[in-house]
Amino acid sequence: MPRQLEGKADSILERGALASGAAGSRAALTLLLAINMFNYIDRQVLAAVQPSIGRDLKLNDQQMGWAATAFLLSYMLLSPLFGWLGDRMSRWILIAIGVVGWSLASGATGLAQTFAILLLTRCFVGIGEAAYGPTAPTLLSDLYPVRVRGTILAWFYVAIPVGSALGYVFGGLIESHVGWRSAFYLLLPPGLLLGALCLFMKEPRRGLSDHIDQPEKVQMGWKDYVQLFRTKSYLLDTAGMTAMTFAMGGVAYWMPAYLAEDRHAGSLATVNLMFGAIVAITGIVATLAGGWLADRLRARFPGSYFLVSAAGLMAAFPAFILLLITPFPFGWVWVFVGCFCLFFNTGPSNTILANVTRPEIRSTAFALNILVIHTLGDAISPPLIGAVADAVDRVRPHAGLGAGFLLVSILMVVGSLLWFWGARYLQADTRAISGEVQV
């Protein structure tokens, strides 16, 4: 067969495989899903046991808020570096390094005897996760085409609620039986195993699912990166995600302490178990439903990924206000509704990032998004809520966290409006990357 015809045949076969993902796509999705779940277990264990850490190390609420921010600072500041590397070297090797690195740092968190050491270990956790966060979604974007990418990324991001829930439950149970330090020690072995498995995975060709023929090594200039800041869908999606992350990050960190200590919804262990179960159930259903619905509506509404994200975030605001004023146990209903609405945008909002950025710089695009949403989002809100809580509690005990929550919840409305605005640009920006016409 002539080389030209052989290349066309290979291309046809390759595109046919993309109907359900390219070769190795299921194995990649499974491993990345497991790693992402472990990632969020690690993050939320700190939130689950932070009252015990505070008592043991004699830290106030604002200091415990900075423990969360220490992780985010290193995570967001180094993400652009690892995103740049992810566009130029094996992403599986980067992920392996990151997973092993953050696992070692998590185990070291259990050894912390001072506030400074606690902050240092959480910074190293952030460095490890910075190698993973910008690169993992780009692997899936190369393995699955635009028409199913929302559903696939929803499956990937379903690890956020499941991992977060397991983090609350695992942290609460371990802390109640053998202390908070053991919760961090036990995170080390599975992390090392998952990191090792990455070394056996095959790197997909960049742009595979976008039907872009290009060499593996591509030299990108500054004008290619500047184009990101001219892509309205990318900018408005990032802005909306920033507002959402500001509200959701602060609330997630302080919610167990708020429910147990301010609202007397149960002991810390009971609250972690109940809240973890709600996060898991709503997160799985809402994340998958949001990705599926956005894919289904795409033919009828070109901006469906924005519209689905915006509708869910807007609906979360009144549910959250009702949570703050409804007595428990009835308040659990609004915890459930609020969590469901917040998770509805996870798949669609991240799919937008993949669909409107070129494969050659997609890791960098995700990395810059991480930098912005955390710098202006949940790097600020946990210590802000802690500071508000400390100030208000001096005047009205057990009212401080609620006041802090009310303050940050306004950003849910802001984020929703930004996403509604972005819907008008999505079709053109997606077509500019993939050449695919939405029908």
Image (cartoon, grey):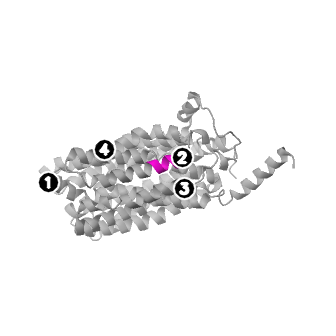
Q: Which residue is mark 2?
A: 91
CA gap between label 1 and label 4 equals 29 Å
Q: Amino acid at mark 2?
A: Arg
Give me the residue at 51% from left, 47% from top.
93
Q: Amino acid at mark 4?
A: Ala
- Element type where label 4 sits in the image: helix
**Res 306 visible:** no
Q: Earlier in the sequence, mark 1 or mark 3?
A: 3
x%, y% of residue 3? 83, 45
Q: Is residue 14 left or right of residue 60?
A: right
Q: Do residues under tags 1 and 3 come within 8 Å of each other at their CB atoms?
A: no
Q: Nearer the viewer, mark 2 or mark 4?
A: 2
Q: Residues within 10 Å of mark 1 (few under 14, many from 20)?
A: few
* Residue 377 quadrant: top left
Query: From the viewer's perspective, is residue 41 above or below residue 374?
Result: below
Q: Nearer the viewer, mark 1 or mark 2?
A: 2
CA gap between label 2 and label 3 equals 17 Å
Q: Which residue is mark 1?
A: 396
x%, y% of residue 346? 48, 55
Q: Is residue 120 left or right of residue 315?
A: left
Q: Which mark is residue 70?
A: 4
Q: Which mark is residue 153?
A: 3
Query: From the viewer's perspective, is residue 265 above or below residue 76?
Result: below
Please state the extent of the stretch shown in magenta in the rendering: 91-97
Q: Do residues under tags 2 and 3 come within 8 Å of each other at their CB atoms?
A: no
CA gap between label 2 and label 4 equals 25 Å
Q: Which mark is residue 36?
A: none
- Element type where label 2 sits in the image: helix
CA gap between label 1 and label 3 equals 44 Å
Q: Amino acid at mark 3?
A: Leu
Instruction: Inspect the magenta stretch and tell me whether residue 105 lies in it.
Output: no
